[in-house]
Amino acid sequence: MSTLEKKQFPLKSLIIAALCIALGVVLPMAFHSIPEGGRIFSPMHIPVLLGGLVTGPILGLIIGILTPLLSHLVTGMPPTFVLPGMLVELAAFGLVAGLLMKTLPLKMVAKTYIALIIAMVVGRVLAGTAHALFFTDGYTFNAFFTAYFVRALPGIALHIVLIPLVYFALVKAKLAGD
């Protein structure tokens, strides 16, 4: 194995990615015990966004793809008709969050919030676009906006508060950050 291959993904990043994927399978089960809890709070989004921020764009993308796939296979969530949109959304979350954390020339706090918010918007817009392309019958802008922003507002607020707090704790523990 060459030196480049060994340095591609540090063991710490691979372990964090695996933990994020596992959390992405387990967290939704807890939230689904609350009526509409999964739909309102989007618990699978939390470890994917956090994984992108911590591990970077490539592992973030992988986390975003594997998390809904494994969750679907293990728990049946998300359901088959929701899975394609969530694959697009979560893959974009992990990729964009990781990419912006690596490239934005800002201080850590500002960079974290901006990367998180932009990733959340890009992922939702791409998922809505994919949904409109694949399920065009009766899919309107109002349906998209309601599903991805209005109904998800409690989850969006939770993510904006919780994810940076966890990220900053990981930085303090020297498990994340530069």
Image (tube, grey):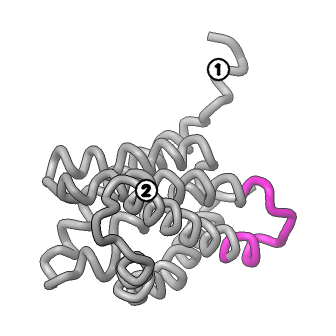
What is the chief secondary structure element of the magenta stretch? helix
Residue indicated by mark 2: 130
In the current view of this chain or complex, which residue is farthest to the top? 1
Whole-percent x and y of residue 102?
75, 53
Q: Residue at x 82, y 72 (%)?
A: 107
Q: Quadrant of residue 11?
A: top right
Q: Nearer the viewer, residue 135 or 161?
A: 135
In the picture shown, does residue 165 fall above or below 73?
below
In the picture shown, does residue 169 fall above or below 58?
below
Left or right, residue 156 beside residue 138: right
User: What quarter of the picture does the N terminus occupy?
Assistant: top right
Left or right, residue 23 beside residue 2: left
Residue indicated by mark 1: 5
Whole-percent x and y of residue 86?
36, 58
Whole-percent x and y of residue 119?
59, 65
Magenta segment includes 108: yes
Upstream in sequence: badge 1 or badge 2:
1
Residue span colored magenta: 101-113
Magenta segment includes 82: no
How far separated are the C-alphas under marks 1 and 2?
Answer: 34 Å
Q: Nearer the viewer, residue 15 or 79?
A: 79
